[in-house]
Image: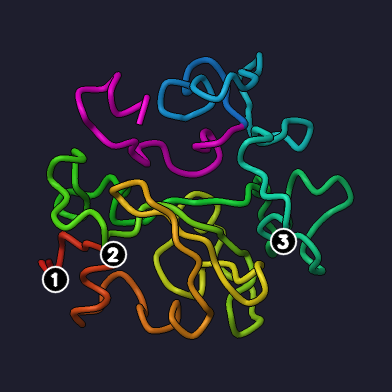
Amino acid sequence: MLYVDNNGGVLIEDIVAGETRFFFGPVIKSNSGLSLVPYLNGKIHTGTDAYNKANAVDPAAVCPSGRRAFGTSYENDNKNWVVDGSSLAPNASYAYNYCCVDKAAGERYRRFTQIPRPATRFLMGDVSIVDSGGTVGSTAGRIVIYGHQNIARRHSNKGNISFADLHVESWTGARLSSVSTYNSTSNVTGDFWHNCRNKTW
């Protein structure tokens, strides 16, 4: 919310793809303005390459119950970074709703005030590199969540999720599975994902 207040009510945006920026770090000076690292008093790394295993995510983005790949064969030795095929990604515990932050036109709300029924709109939650069926998830999950399988069930088969009105709930795996993916046209998914493209709201 500090980021929103400082940026005219605009939600944080996934505007730089790939390896150059992550919402919870690591970041370098040139892209720290599009992250939450300054608001968490986190470290802004020197040089030109934040995508380096020597750089960690901010501690505030690490859940005491585990990270994206914590406790699986996909974690590496220092647990700051995870391996998914040939790709590496910072091992944070949380990620944002794809429909809140995706940069493509028509797929996201630009401001908090645009979000209808904020108490039902998913904002951020526990993220997992391994989906609910046990298969490896996409590396896109390093900063966004776009399907129920991206939400970790690390709390006794429950996932903690926050909503656009900033309250937090703990949902069972079965309930999380009911919301499918962001591009579904079902009412429950529309209320949860607030997908602009399909106008499910």
Marks 3 and 1, how far apart in space? Answer: 32 Å
Q: Residue at x 29, y 56 (%)?
A: 99
Dot placed on the residue nearer the N-terminal end, 1 or 2: 2
**Label 1 secondary element:** loop
> Type of residue at label 1?
Thr
Residue 151 is left or right of residue 188, and the answer is: right
Q: Are marks 1 and 2 in contact (CB under 8 Å)?
A: yes
Q: What is the number of the mark on residue 193?
A: 2
What is the distance, in whole Å, between disc 2 and disc 3 at their CAs?
24 Å
Please state, as top left, top right, bottom left or bottom right, where the C terminus lies in the image.
bottom left
Q: Amino acid at mark 2?
A: Trp
Query: Magenta segment: does it hold 8?
Result: yes
Q: Assess disc 3: are there few (<14), some (14-19) or many (≥20) residues with their C-alpha within 10 Å of its C-alpha.
A: many
Q: Is residue 52 magenta?
A: no
Q: Relative to 50, is 14 above or below?
A: below
Residue under circle 1?
A: 200
Name the amino acid, label 3. Answer: Ala
The label nearer to you, 2 versus 3, is 2
Write down the residue under mark 3: 69
| Image position, residue 190 (x, y; %) | 21, 71
Q: Is residue 23 left or right of residue 153?
A: left
Closer to the N terminus: mark 2 or mark 3? Answer: 3
**At 34% from the left edge and 59% from the top edge, which residue is drawn?**
122
Q: Residues within 10 Å of mark 2 (few under 14, many from 20)?
A: many
Residue at image coords 29%, 67%: 192
94 vs 105, nearest the viewer: 94
Locate the N terminus by quadrant: top left
Residue 139 image point, x, y percent: 56, 59
Of residues 129 and 65, the one nearer the viewer is 65
Q: Which residues are magenta?
A: 1-25
